[in-house]
Amino acid sequence: ILKPTDDSLSQLVKELYFLFLREFQQADIKYLSGWNQWKRSSRKSWKKVFDEAKEVLSYLELWRHDIHSIEGKFGTGIQSYFSFLRFLVLLNFVIFTLMFSFVTLPSIISKYGIFNSSFDEIPAKKPHCTVYTPSGNKGLIYFYTYPKDLLSGTGFLEMTSLFYGYYTIDAAWISIFRYNLPLAYLLTTFAYLALSLLWIIKRSVEGFKQNLVHDEDQFQSYCNKVFAGWDFCITDLNAARLKHRSLQYELKTDLEEERLKQKIADRTMKDKLRIYSLRIFLNIIVLAVLSGCFYSIYRATVFSQGNISNVTNLLVQYLPSIVITLANFIAPQIFSVLIRLEDYSPAFEIRLTLMRCVFVRLANIGVLLFSLWSQISYCATEKCKACGYNYELYPCWESQVGQEMYKLLIFDFIIIVAVTLFVDFPRKLLVTYCSCKPVQWCGLQEFGISDNVLEIIYGQTICWIGTFYSPLLPAIATMKYFIVFYIKKISLIHTRKPSARPIRASSSNFFFLVVLLIGLVLAFIPLGISIAHIPSSKACGPFRNFNTSWAVVPHTILGFPTGLQKVLYGIASEAFAVPFFMVICLVMFYFIALAGAHKRVVEQLREQLVMESRDKLFLIRKITEAQKHT
């Protein structure tokens, strides 16, 4: 009798396993009714169709090949930045689709009489507040006028659909249907904010699950990468190399984090006292830098708005944007130097640097808006107080806020392009062709993930705030991020080098989304104040006949039937809100208790798996000993 080889034996075992599984399934189907058999076959067919459709759609994914290539060459940390950039491109495109479909398109259709449409315009009640003469191009036009208007949002752009002042329609009639544009404008604003919030939370939950699994058991993470990390479906040599580099980079990151944990554990009391004292001192420096940035932006905004009549001076108009950009550039450089002295892990370095830079960039926008609104709400005469805002300097203040957001977005894009062309590429040429020791000591600049991520989160926060005042701003943001992807990719491949300290993608993705969520929450504050508190312009915009933008909601409810009005007012009353809040709290406590129970069950199952693995090791040891004695 021939002794079977290991390969033939394993093949025989596989065939027996699949034969047994097939017979078991067929026997199971025999005991099902015809209806249940049809449901099972239909479920399998639909599952197969969905899987195939999902596979086809994966090939249509934006920048799929580029991002995989970046992951293989530079690791998953840098790949997470480009995936994050792709997410923002899609998010802004969806926001643009919402604003264009429900705000811009109905206005254009009604103004030009397309589809037998018309519009209503109700004259304002306070004539002295309605004087608004946009700074259009009149008379002799110089050659530099149009580029200046494109950069500043003034001139021929001021009364286009790009800005709030264009939407002066109270109602659009499309055939026999009445379209309430003010209400649509407000609801679409709420819709894009809610969509952004839900989308970010959904992606954050997915990243949190990965982060939780990784942090739960470090040994399990090593085993998954070493024994189950390889994709055996890969047949292409280039794809195999990319996957190999990606796994290598992940293991390198794990080992680096373990080394730092061991270093922290070995610190003496003297080392801890020294490092904590140094961190306190460095944080005082950080607070001083933040205070200097905020004061500079406030003074620049007050000076720029004080010379608002000087529309020909582009430098004066761009002064707040220039100061904000300088603060955004200088402060992170100072923070990146300070963070190296604080001796944190690479992952925590990114988080702390991001949080500090968040306070700089996002608070800078807040200081700019506070400075603008302090100028807008300043009234010295009774006529001005009757309007509720400074109508002489800001007849259409929403459009002027939109112009500031537009200038910030454009100037941010110009800086990204300028840094790549006039800083990164010359530095690359110097390092490549100049053998001087100072040049070689400086070397190529690292691709700083925290700086680049914060750069696009800053731009996205501007877009969220500015969309209410400039409805087509998401279209500009979409084109900006689309171009920035290729600029950053070329810069990474040709002029930058990856970080010398490995960075984990799972924690980075989750934290990027958390910082983006902070930016969105901070965008709610100025928009909420603007909609509910600041009086709307009486000379332009869809809300010029209302005291505030929010006033359109109760005005619309008054047109509903009496029964529906009572229901809505009842929902908004305290008698409904208090029981509803109590029910929500009970549901929340129930899910918290359920999650705790599930966690205990998972821990018990994990302990059982550990016991089973020990039993298997014991049996293997006994079998080995028995074989040795025979």
Image (tube, grey):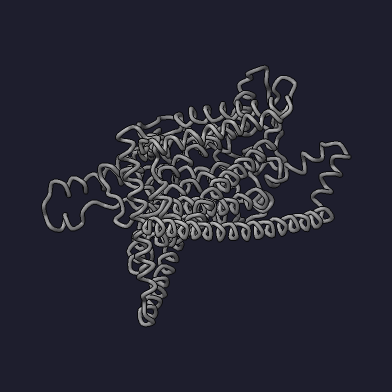
Left of 429 or right of it: where is 623? right
> Residue 495, position in %: x, y?
25, 45
Q: Nearer the viewer, residue 181 or 187?
A: 187
Residue extending furthest right? Answer: 563
Hey, which quadrant is residue 324 in on the image? bottom left
Look at 15% across and 58% down and name the residue there. 438
Snapshot quadrant of residue 67: top left
Q: Position of residue 589 (x, y in %)?
A: 71, 59
Q: For the view shown, which residue lies furthest in the bottom direction?
A: 270
Across and down, in percent, residue 543 comes to 67, 40
| Residue 64: % across, % down | 41, 35
Can residue 622 be seen here?
Answer: yes
On screen, residue 265 above or below 386: below
Position of 182 with respect to 567 (left or right) is left
**Quadrant position of the N terminus in the picture:** top left
> In terms of depth relative to the viewer, which is nearer, 289 or 41?
41
Compared with 116, 233 (above or below) is below
Instruction: Using residue 288 as the reference point, say whether residue 520 is left or right of it.
Output: right
Is residue 316 visible in the rendered image? The answer is no
40 or 346, nearer to the observer: 40
